[in-house]
Image (cartoon, grey):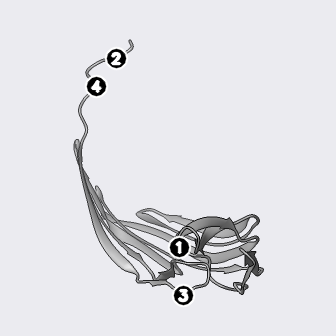
Amino acid sequence: MSDFGIKKQFSNGELSLSTFYALHDNVLSSVYNSDFKANILQNVGEAEVYGINLISSFEPFDNFLLFFNPSIQKSSIKNTLVYQNKLFDIKNNTIPETPKVIVKSGAIYHHDSFSHSIMLKTVGSQFGDIENNQKVKGYTNIDTRHEYSFKTIFSNS
């Protein structure tokens, strides 16, 4: 795997842009087995993944942070597969369960011992099978987190 990136920090935030490339060997992926009537993991050989990531954060005022982190990637299988005497022409197919786009954005607020955050995560569409026949819709979810930090009750000293 290789990556290259640049990072710039500002007084109230940061911006980081990176690209990556990976060539994987012995990739496991789901293949339908008609004897068991279920998907099983099978070695599909080599796969290539490359893309670009942006990490950005901005603190418009004390204790309040905004972030926006999109990622775009492309994946492809580099060879065909023979499984149960059947040829699967999967060369150049997308690796299953590998979305092209993932975007995370949100805000974090800290005050004294309290911390509150909200994150919006969007995951693009992807395939659920090695033959790229089962398209899985993208989705978006919202996560919230609320924390309170207690003072240390017990100490080693």
SS type, badge 2: loop
Judging by the rendered image, the residue that carries numbered circle 2 is 155
Disc 4 and disc 2: Cα gap in Å?
Answer: 7 Å
- Please tell me which residue lies in front, 42 or 19: 42
* In the image: residue 95, left or right of residue 128: right
Amino acid on which the number 1 mark rests in the picture: Glu
* In the image: residue 24, left or right of residue 147: right
Q: Earlier in the sequence, mark 4 or mark 3?
A: 3
Judging by the rendered image, the residue that carries numbered circle 3 is 133
Q: Residues within 10 Å of mark 1 (few under 14, many from 20)?
A: some
SS type, badge 4: loop
Disc 4 and disc 1: Cα gap in Å?
Answer: 43 Å
Displayed quadrant of residue 12 = bottom left
Q: Are marks 4 and 2 in contact (CB under 8 Å)?
A: yes
Disc 4 and disc 3: Cα gap in Å?
Answer: 55 Å
Q: Are marks 3 and 2 in contact (CB under 8 Å)?
A: no
Q: Are marks 4 and 1 in contact (CB under 8 Å)?
A: no
- Residue mark closest to the camera, 4 vs 3: 3
Amino acid on which the number 3 mark rests in the picture: Asn
Q: Earlier in the sequence, mark 1 or mark 2?
A: 1
